[in-house]
Image (cartoon, rainbow, N blue to C red):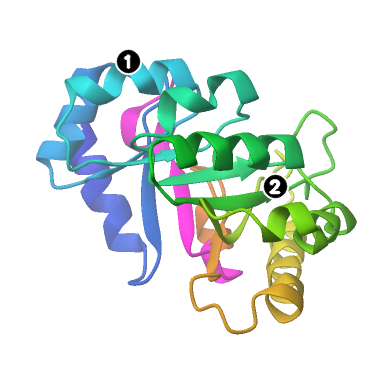
């Protein structure tokens, strides 16, 4: 199957209200254009400089999501156009996003990334670290970022019960933060979880954004 067929198949499986981010990292501009021409306009990249290089070569109505670990010195490359940063995992990064967004007079939507998997290699906050950030006076003064929800990656395992439990945990974290910090904020509504191998479970557990790459574009 080609990229267009893969997209049509996956979109048919995703309920209304769940956003599909086609993860185009490492893929050439031609592959992204094929998906775009099939009617898809939301793409995700995980390297700032790769995204910075691709963006001018592609249609300007694409909604770009940054989904990878973001180094503070690379933030400036994506801030002028990125729609959503999924991977805020430390105060230092949030500070830099706010600073660079202020320079270009933008408010940039962000998700807090949580470490929900058993693998130590994955990045992310724990609930206490997130509470510390959101309680801080520094965060409260930031006017150029808007935190819209949470993101997480499940353990890479064939044990469905483990994956389901980790996704359920992320949803619980989101609900705790909503109650404590965002009670009156309708925009704090996103749960970005689920990739090619586990997005169906993620949707069952409450995901609002799924990040699917290899099932659309083929193996990397």
**Category of crowding for the residue at label 1, using alpha-carbon neighbours closer than 10 angstroms: few (below 14), some (14–19), many (at least 20):** few
Q: Position of residue 122 (x, y in %)?
A: 75, 34
The residue closer to the viewer here, 205 or 124, is: 124
Q: What residue appears at the point 20 percent right and 36 percent down from the top-left corner?
A: 35
Residue on which disc 1 sits? 53
Q: Position of residue 189 (x, y in %)?
A: 53, 71
Locate residue 43 relative to residue 92 in the image: left or right: left
Task: Tell me whether circle 2 and circle 1 mark residues in contact (CB < 8 Å).
Answer: no
**Stretch in magenta:** 203-220
Q: CA distance from mark 2 to mark 1?
A: 30 Å
Q: What residue appears at the point 38 percent right and 59 percent down from the top-left corner?
A: 19
Residue on which disc 2 sits? 154
Question: Is label 2 or label 1 in front?
Answer: 1
**Residue 140's quadrant in the figure?**
bottom right
Q: What residue appears at the point 78 percent right and 58 percent down from the top-left corner?
A: 137
Q: Position of residue 38 (x, y in %)?
A: 12, 42
Locate residue 88 relative to residue 144 in the image: left or right: right
**Category of crowding for the residue at label 2, using alpha-carbon neighbours closer than 10 angstroms: few (below 14), some (14–19), many (at least 20):** many
48 in relation to 129, above or below: above
The residue closer to the viewer here, 200 or 211, is: 211
Q: Position of residue 31 (x, y in %)?
A: 23, 24
């Amino acid at each position: 199957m080609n990229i267009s067929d893969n997209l049509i198949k996956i979109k048919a499986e995703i309920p209304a209200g769940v956003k599909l981010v086609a993860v185009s990292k490492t893929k050439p501009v031609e592959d992204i254009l094929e998906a775009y021409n099939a009617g898809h306009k939301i793409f995700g990249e995980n390297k700032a400089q790769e995204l910075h290089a691709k963006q001018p070569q592609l249609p300007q109505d694409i909604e770009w999501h940054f989904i990878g670990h973001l180094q503070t010195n690379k933030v400036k490359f994506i801030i002028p156009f990125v729609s959503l940063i999924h991977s805020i995992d430390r105060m230092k990064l949030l500070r830099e996003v706010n600073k660079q967004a202020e320079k270009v007079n933008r408010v940039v939507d962000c998700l807090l990334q949580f470490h929900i998997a058993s693998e130590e290699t994955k990045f992310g906050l724990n609930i206490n670290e997130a509470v510390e950030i959101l309680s801080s006076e520094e965060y409260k003064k930031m006017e150029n970022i808007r935190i819209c929800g949470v993101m997480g990656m499940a353990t890479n395992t064939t044990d469905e019960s483990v994956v389901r439990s980790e996704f359920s945990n992320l949803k619980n974290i989101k609900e705790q933060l909503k109650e404590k910090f965002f009670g009156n904020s309708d925009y704090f509504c996103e749960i970005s979880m689920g990739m090619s191998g586990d997005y169906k479970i993620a949707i069952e557990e409450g995901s609002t954004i799924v990040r699917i790459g290899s099932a659309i574009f083929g193996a990397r």
